[in-house]
Amino acid sequence: MSTLLRVDSVDAGYGDFQALFGIDLEVAEGELLALVGANGAGKSTLLKTIAGALKPFRGTIGLAGEDVTAEPDIRRARKGVCLVPEGRRLFPSLTVEENLQVGAATGRKGPWNLAKVYEAIPLVADRRARKAARLSGGEQQAVAIGRALMGNPRLLLLDEVSLGLAPLVVDQLYTALPGIRAEGATVILVEQDLNRTFAVADRIACVLEGRIVLTGTTAGLTRDQVTAAYFGTGAFPEVKTP
Ligand SMILES: Nc1ncnc2c1ncn2[C@@H]1O[C@H](COP(=O)(O)OP(=O)(O)OP(=O)(O)O)[C@@H](O)[C@H]1O
């Protein structure tokens, strides 16, 4: 499979503070990669750097063979890179449907439209006429994913979208994932729940204190290895598996 995303020797952070150190990562077209790591490990920072919301101090970000390091998030969005950040970022005075329509502003052609989003995430369909301000946190999160899909993402970056959500909502989001991939999206997600991670991901990358300390296919890694990498205990394999 061809490489969609290539992160090369990336250092990144905020002002004087360095949060990421020498990140190398490749994600193949169509793959689902899960980023795992403790609070503050640097997962969100990595997603922001990939999305172009944060400019790396050093290193490069390649998308489908093109160096996009210098391109801001808006230009990357037009190329299909879409970040669904932690927390709610909807327009509160707009309805759910209007918020979804905002997502189509990338102008990217593709399989996703309102009907498809409603089919994939029924919870969103049920709330379509409601103002975003009147949604629960979980409902807003589900709409944020729907809005991202409306932009026909080529690379969908989901940052802890299940955080604080009711199990029913999380189930609906995870049930929608295979369909999202079948429509052609490559996905990187941050997920704290290892059971879910192992159930949905093709590959896992563990981030510890700003470094990727372990990567491997879900089938090739054990929970113990991932847990040890998460907490920074135990020995990690010296060589990263493909
Ligand atoms: N806007 C910011 N300004 C300064 N430092 C920040 C900012 N955002 C994050 N950091 C710091 O960067 C480091 C990495 O944070 P990041 O949010 O990427 O971690 P994370 O792995 O996503 O954590 P969590 O699981 O808690 O969301 C942390 O030390 C954090 O305090």
Image (cartoon, grey):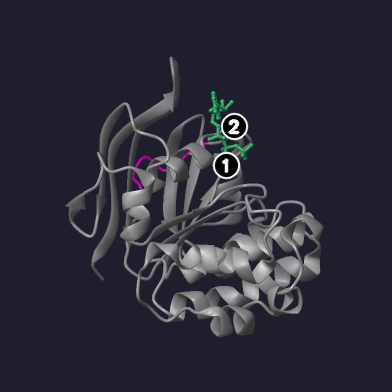
Q: What residue sits right under mark 2 in the picture?
A: 40
| Callout count | 2
Q: Secondary structure at mark 2?
A: loop
Q: Residue furthest front?
A: 93
Check whether the beta carbons of the residues at disc 1 and disc 2 lie within 8 A of each other: no
150 relative to 78, above or below: below
Does residue 139 appear left or right of residue 146 in this picture? right
The structure residue drawn at horizontal position 60% and vertical position 50%, both measured from the top left corner, is: 224
Image quadrant assignment for residue 195: bottom right
- Say whether residue 171 is visible: yes
Indicate yes or no: mark 2 CB to ligand 1 under 8 Å.
yes
Residue 1 spot, x, y in % from top left: 26, 71
The structure residue drawn at horizontal position 52% and vertical position 63%, both measured from the top left corner, is: 102
Q: Is residue 237 magenta?
A: yes
202 relative to 84, above or below: below
Indicate yes or no: mark 1 CB to ligand 1 under 8 Å.
yes
Observer-nearest of 80 and 201: 80
Which numbered circle lies on residue 78?
A: none
Disc 2 marks which amino acid? Gly
Disc 1 marks which amino acid? Gly
Residue 229 spot, x, y in % from top left: 54, 40
The structure residue drawn at horizontal position 35% and vertical position 47%, both measured from the top left corner, is: 240
Quick one: label 1, few (<14), some, or many (20+) residues within 10 Å? many
Which segment did they paint magenta?
235-240
View quadrant of ligand 1: top right
Which numbered circle lies on residue 37?
A: 1
- Say whether residue 146 is visible: no
Residue 13 spot, x, y in % from top left: 43, 26
